[in-house]
Amino acid sequence: MFFKKIKNAFQNEPQHPLILESGVNTHYNGFRTCVYYSDWSIYDRKHFPEDIPLELVTNIFYAFFNVDPNSGKVELSDQWADTDIEFKSPYTHKSIHGLLARFFEIKQHNRQIKISMSIGGWSNGDNFKKGTNSALKLQKFVESSLELMVQYGFDGIDLDWEYPETKKEAGLLLQIMKQLRLGLREIEDERGLERDSYLLTIASPAFEEKLENFQIQAMDKYLSFWNLMTYDFAGEWSEKTGYHCNLYKKHPDELCADDSVKYFLSKGIDPSKLTLGMANYGRSFTKTNGYGRPFNGVGTGSSDEAGIWNYNKLPLPGATEEYDHESVIAFSYDSRNQIFVSYDNIHSVFQKAKYVVDKRLGGGMWWESCGDRYNDEEKSLIHNFVHGLGGKDKLDSSNNTIEGYSSSEYLKQNFGDHL
């Protein structure tokens, strides 16, 4: 019976969750290329799983699952998109229902791709806090997460709590990780799988200010790897315009990805467990004279988020694109309309790939998949990043997990005997 050890841990020692004797076994054999896919992408963005260049991707994080603040139960965020929308399978040409079935089918036919369920997200941060603030809620959170992972055929669980603000909240996050890893190992033992076949990851803040309460070394014992959110360094909250996803900084008071990586390395984290985050979008500033200048507003965006422009919409009409070699970031400026936008382009991601290789990091990650120019290899961020790594042969090719899901009614309804 799954989760027996977890229930015993909560019932007998809720204040002292079981601590694993050793760290996590890692099974990847090359660089990771990870993308977050949001279930709302199918609406205005018209972005579907088949749009992703699967041959270039090793990990997909399905965003997001919500947390019920009253019970702690983890649940679907959009049932129609997640389980009900009808697709025609490109493999069998039969009908399947829901993005989750579509992604499971992708796993079956692309064994190098691991797909994890991502819990939380920016808009769910308060629910995360309220949904884990008691032992009973914490137990419900862990058990429901594991049940959903099995029900929908995922390879792991990704935690995206933005952000734990106190030592107590950071301690709750650590406790969640301990119990989830315990549950994942219980499922592995039940199914006869190699230890730590299932992934447990975190979308981690990259600013030292947000990390000061984290018990990083303790967390690392339970994590397969860290997805560093090394973007959003500047935005509407800033005093002046700035770069939002730069690798290096020009001024001491700026944030940059290199400082984030150095911070984790200083805590003793194996560089291969660090995934460098990149943005498939730019951040805009309006009524400004350029970089490092005052601004008034951030303008509209390519969708419903003010000041956020998908990379595939950049540079904006009327703007001139430039590349800052020192900071490793692109920007565009429209002098007529006084709009400044910073973002990654093909040159910056190529240099970031070289940085990943030089620093022996684990790979790269993007939020979110809908923003790239996948249909144009020369202008695609992920294509140029993989080229910078040395090509597809340098990517992780370890197998995902497709066995052991025959108990899932949802998957049986979609695939019958083909599980």
Image (tube, rainbow, N blue to C red):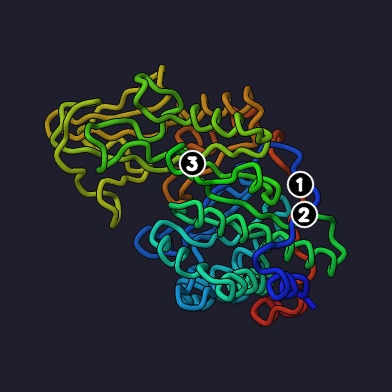
Mark 2 → mark 1, Cα distance in angstroms: 7 Å
Q: Nearer the viewer, residue 6 or 332?
A: 6
Identify the element where label 1 is drawn.
loop
Mark 3 → mark 1, Cα distance in angstroms: 22 Å
Circle 2: is it few (<14), some (14-19), or many (20+) Cα within 10 Å? few
Label 3 vs 2, first from the N-terminus: 2
Badge 2 is on which residue? Answer: 20
User: x, y percentage for residue 348?
Assistant: 45, 27
Which residue corresponds to the image point at 66% horizontal and 46% vertical from the top-left? 218
Q: Residue furthest top?
A: 326
Badge 1 is on which residue? Answer: 23
Find residue 156 and report its image quarter: bottom right
Is any part of residue 245 visible from this angle?
Answer: yes
Q: Is residue 202 left or right of residue 317?
A: right
Q: Nearer the viewer, residue 217 or 155?
A: 217
Which residue corresponds to the image point at 62% horizontal and 50% vertical from the top-left? 59
Q: Nearer the viewer, residue 223 or 30?
A: 223
Find residue 285 and report its image quarter: top left
The answer to whether the residues at label 2 and label 1 have Cβ atoms under 8 Å apart is yes
Amino acid of disc 1: Gly
User: x, y percentage for residue 320?
Assistant: 25, 27
Closer mark to the observer between disc 3 and disc 1: 3
Identify the element where label 3 is drawn.
loop
Q: Is residue 355 left or right of residue 42?
A: right
Identify the element where label 2 is drawn.
loop
The answer to whether the residues at label 3 and label 2 have Cβ atoms under 8 Å apart is no
Which residue corresponds to the image point at 85% horizontal and 65% vertical from the top-left? 189
Closer mark to the observer between disc 2 and disc 1: 2
Q: Is residue 124 left or right of residue 138?
A: left
Q: From the viewer's perspective, is residue 109 above or below residue 389?
A: below
Badge 3 is on which residue? Answer: 212
Amino acid of disc 3: Glu
